[in-house]
Image (tube, rainbow, N blue to C red):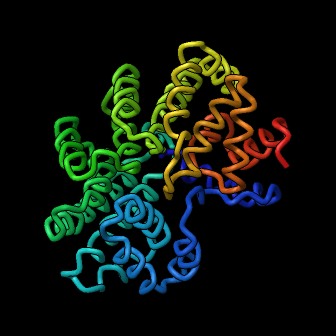
Amino acid sequence: MLLVNVVRAGVVLENASHMRIGQAWDDPSLDAALPGVRAGRLDQGLELIRAARGDNELRALRVQELALAARSHTDALARLPENDPDALLWLGAARVKHAWDIRGASLARYVDDDRFTRFHEALEAAEPPLRRAAEALPEDPVPWAQLQWHAVGSQAGRPALDRIWRELHTRDPALYAGHHGRAQALCAKWYGSDDELLAFAHDTVEASRPGDPVTAILPLAHFEIAWQEADYSGHDNEETLRARFRRPDVSGELIEAADKWRVGSLPHPFAPEAMHLFGAAFSYSGHHSRAQTLLTGAGRRVPEILPWAAASITPGRRYARARRELGIT
């Protein structure tokens, strides 16, 4: 998550590759609404969030991306009906995104005290509307998915994060966005360790239904670990990624996880992101036919951070290179 701003700085350069950076999802209605929301036209965004009640995966995606689009319009979001749980959810999520924008992409030691103060103030304002949204719709897991990101940033500590995860998991034990956030919380750079992150990823694959792309949490975990290894060792990221993904134990478990998803795969708004995670892993491991199939399906919609940002500050260009190397036109 900390590379968000760095990655965005490279988007203009990457347009030459005709990549759509940060848009690895399947939701045409969301695509259509985002330009207007960025311009401050909020009605359509609120209606999309409301219309996704009961479809947890779609609702989580829409809240995530509409919060990002509206993060500079939090004052206007605060003027929406204060008892509307969809508006409260959107407001809280947008404040979380705005807070992370204030903090920036730098490592903590490079963030000055003033920015940290403003970061924590913005996060503090995000929690009440998220809690109220959770109370108003007690079966909804999406406020809890957003509260995970709030808790990571506010340094709430591992016990608080574990409580949030239990609330979320009780409401939806397979929510992709929820598992993505939990994996981040369990990274060694936050509140866990490499072993704990991998154990969580293995448990996620084991518990998943056939056809569910939540199995992509496994390659996500391996990318997180390899990324950190490269940063701390000073080694070339490409070399570190190839070394990890060509290990027989790693490539073997990724093949099993991918096959569990792809055999009878279900329609899912996060399927393109899962295609990138597995496809990139197989491109580094040398399983090129698997990578070709997955990345052909992913098209030119590229996740903003992992997997391609693990190897390059311009992930769209790195993905374009992978497509050329695999012979994907």
On the image, the x and y values in percent for residue 45 come to 44, 79
Residue at x 49%, y 56% (from the top left corner)? 268
* Picture coordinates of residue 178, whole percent (x, y): 34, 48
Q: Residue furthest top?
A: 248
**Is residue 160 found left or right of 3 in the rendered image?**
left
Q: Is residue 97 left or right of residue 158?
A: right
Look at 56% across and 53% down and name the residue there: 5
Report the label total. Answer: 0
Residue 300 visible, this orientation:
yes
Q: Quadrant of residue 197?
A: top left
Q: Is residue 73 left or right of residue 300?
A: left
Residue 188 in view here: no
| Residue nearest the viewer, comparing 220 with 314 | 220
- Counting from the top left corner in percent of width and height, residue 158 is at 22, 35
Which one is in front, 220 or 175? 175
Q: Is residue 316 above or below residue 217?
A: below
Is the residue 227 above or below the residue 39 in the image? Answer: above
Q: Nearer the viewer, residue 217 or 240?
A: 217
Quarter residue 129 falls in = bottom left
- Eyeballing the image, is 325 above or below 213? above
Q: Position of residue 141 (x, y in %)?
A: 26, 57
